[in-house]
Amino acid sequence: MGDMTEIDRHRRPGPRIEEVARLAGVSKSTVSRVINGEQYVSAKARDAVHTAITHLRYSPNQAARSLAGSKANALALIVSEQGSRVLGDPFFAGVLRGVHAELTGRRIQLLLMLSRPEDHDDLIAYLASGHVDGALLVSLHGDDPLPRRLQEIGLPVVVGGRPLAAGTVPFVDSDNFTGGLDAVRHLVSLGRTRIATVAGPRDMAAGLDRLSGWRRGLGEARLAADLVAEADFTPESGALAMEELLRRAPDIDAVFVAADIIALGVLQVLHARGRRVPEDVAVVGFDDSLLASTATPPLTTVRQDVEQLGRTMTWRLLGELAGDSGLPPSLLLPTSLVRRASA
Amino acid sequence: MGDMTEIDRHRRPGPRIEEVARLAGVSKSTVSRVINGEQYVSAKARDAVHTAITHLRYSPNQAARSLAGSKANALALIVSEQGSRVLGDPFFAGVLRGVHAELTGRRIQLLLMLSRPEDHDDLIAYLASGHVDGALLVSLHGDDPLPRRLQEIGLPVVVGGRPLAAGTVPFVDSDNFTGGLDAVRHLVSLGRTRIATVAGPRDMAAGLDRLSGWRRGLGEARLAADLVAEADFTPESGALAMEELLRRAPDIDAVFVAADIIALGVLQVLHARGRRVPEDVAVVGFDDSLLASTATPPLTTVRQDVEQLGRTMTWRLLGELAGDSGLPPSLLLPTSLVRRASA
DNA sequence: CCACAATGTGATAGCGCTCTCACAAGGGCG
DNA sequence: CGCCCTTGTGAGAGCGCTATCACATTGTGG
C-alpha cells in the first residue's frame, strides 16, 4: 500500500490530430475517419492522411479517444488470485500470449488486474465506471460470483475455463471431458485394466471434467472406476495422492493424472516404490506443458492449446463488443493425445 | 491481426464528479481536490465529499483525468519477447506480482505490452504519445536498444535485470555476482576442489554476473576456473552442457548451475552417468524456483526474491515520477543460499 | 432533366475531468 | 488598524479527440 505517490509530469506528446489534418490538407474530421477506418473517405484523402501520420509519427491520444468516444479501447485481463501462483502457471502464460496475439493490430490495450475475492468490490466499482470495454477472466475457483457481478453491471465478460457456477456467463474451455476420455481409451488400448486417476481439485471445472472423462472411459471398457485420489496443482500433492492409490490398490497398472505438474510427483513416488513406468504402471498426464517432455520418462499427455484458448476468448469478447450476433455462448476447444514414453 | 474490430457501445457509467459535488454541497473543484489528495481542503468538506463518493459509488473517469491532467495514470510493463517463453517463467510471474503489489492502492493501471524487437518502432511511437507515465522493462536480451530509446523520448524507465549495454538506464537486479560467489564458497567449504559451472547465456547479464561470481569464488580458493559450459534456460541444454563437462573433466566433484531449470538437465545426466548427488558431485542451482524443492535430490540453490525485484522496480519508477531526488540510479537486491540435499 | 439517394467533407459541440485564476475569510505583525 | 500571507473555495477554460449535423458533390432512375 503506502502513501499515494503522485505521478507528476508535463510532457508535450508529439503532434495533434490538428497538425495531421493541416499537413494532409483535410479537416480533423477526415483524419478521424481515416484513423477509425470509417467509410465515406476518398482514396486520395486516405492516402494523404496516412502519409501525414507516418511523417509526423502521429499516434492518437487514447485518453481523448476514450473520453470523446465513450469507450475505453481497453480490455481487462482479470486474474482471480488465490494461491497467487497462477501467474507463474504456463497455462496463464499461454492464455496471455493468445490474448495478446489476438489484440495485436487493433488499438486495444490490455489492462492486467489481479484480484483477490476480498478486493472484488473495489474491482467492480472500478470496472463499472467504464474504464474498460470488456473483461477476460481466468483462474476462477469454486463458484466465484465475479463474472456474474460483472455481467450485472453490463460489462461484457468471457471466462477462460468453464466456471463451476452454472449460469449464462460465456466461457471458453478445453474439452477436458474428451481429453480425459481419450487418455483412458489409450490406456485401455494398451491392455491396462486397473486404471486409477489423480484428479484435480474439485473446485475447478477442469478437474471435474477430466475426472468425468476418465469415468466414462472406464465405463466404456466395463472397468471399475473406483480408484480416485485428489491433488492440487503441485507435485507434492501428486506424490501424496499416488502413495494413497498404491496403498489402496497395489495392483494398479495405469494412472491418468489431471495435470503434468501433478504427474511429476506421481512419477517420483512410482520410481521410489520401484514401479517401472510404463512397464508396471502407465502414466498419462494433462496439459502437455514443458514439464511433460522433460519428465523421466517423458510423459504421454493430453495436450490442450492454451494459446488458442486465449485467442478464442478474446475473439469471442471482441465479437460481442462489435455487436456480432450469433456468437456461440461458449466454446470447447479440442484436445489431443501426445504419445511419449510413459504410456 | 485480422480486421479492426470496433468496440461499439453506449454505456452511461455511474455518477459524474458534478453529482458528487452537488451531494456534498461543494464545487467540482473541491471534489477534485479531495480525490487528488491536495492540501487546502477543510476537514468538513473532505468528509462530505468522501461520504458522497461512497454513497454514489463514484469512480472518476480515468480517460478524463488523463486528458485534463496530461498524465496517463498508467505504467507499461514491457516484456521483450523473444523465445516467448518468458511469460511462463516464474521469474516474470514473481516480478509481476511484485509490481502489482506496489501499485495496489494507488490509482495507477498496469498495461501489459509484449514487444518483439521488430515491433519496437510501433511500441515507441505509442509510448511517445503519453499513454503511460513510465515503463518497466523485463527480460531484455543482448544490448537491446529499447530502454535507451525510451529514455530518449523522455519516458522514465526502469529495467529489471542489469542490461548488458552499459549506460545510464536505471535498473534493479539481484546481486547475481555475490550469489555465484556464495554458491562456490559453499561448495569449497564442503571440501570440493573440482568445481565446474554451467553458465547461463552470454547475452544476459544475469548469466555473466553469476559466472563472474563463480570465478571469483574459485580465485579465492586458489582453484582452477577452467570448467565452464554454457546453456540457455532449458533442461535440455543443461544436459548437453553437463555431458560436455563430464567428458572434459571426469573428476568433477561439484557444479554451480546458473539456473534451477538448467540444473534439472544437469541432474538428469549426472544420474544417467551413475554419479551420485551430492556424494560424487555436489550441485548448486540458482533462483530457488519451485523446481528446486521438487528436484531429485532437492536442490541447494541461490535464492533471489523476484517479487521484491518487481516491487523495487516499481518503487524506483514511481519515485522518479514523483520527482524524488536522490534516488539510487540502480539497485542490487541480496541473494541467499538455500541449503537442501544436492550440496 | 429533375428528384433523390449515395458519397465525401468540414465545422463544432461536447466527453468528464484538472488546472489556473480570482477571490473571500481569517491571523500574525509592524 | 491596515497590510500581507496562509487557507479555503468556486468559476470556467481547456485537454485532444469523436459524433453529429450541415452541406457539397456526384450518380441514377423516372
Image (cartoon, coloured by chain):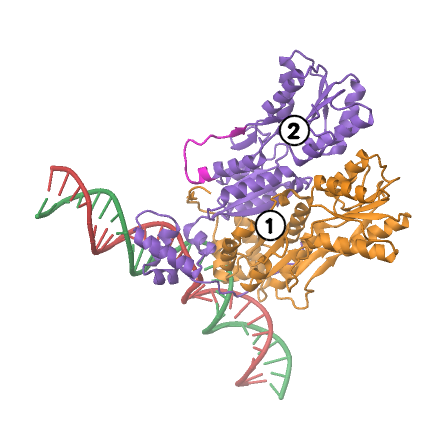
Chain colours: A purple, B orange, C green, D red
**Residue A205 % position (x, y):** 61, 28
Task: Give the label on residue B91, or none.
Answer: none
Residue where numbered disc 2 is placed: A286
Q: Residue under circle 1?
A: B79
Residue at 69 percent across and 29 percent down: it is A299
As displayed, is residue A237 above or below residue A318? above
The range drawn in magenta is: A318-333
Q: Chain of mark 2?
A: A
Residue at the image position 75 percent from the left and 50 percent from the top = B304
| Occupied quadrant, residue A100 | top right
Badge 2 marks a residue whose secondary structure is: strand
Left or right for B138, reference D29:
right
**Side (left or right) of A228 relative to A217:** right
Give the crowd class for mark 1: few <14, some 14-19, many >=20 residues within 10 Å. many
The kind of residue on which mark 2 rests is: Phe
In what quadrant of the picture does the C terminus of chain A appear?
top right
Of B243 and B317, which appears nearest the observer? Answer: B243
Residue B66 on image: x %, y % = 50, 58
Q: Amino acid at mark 1?
A: Val
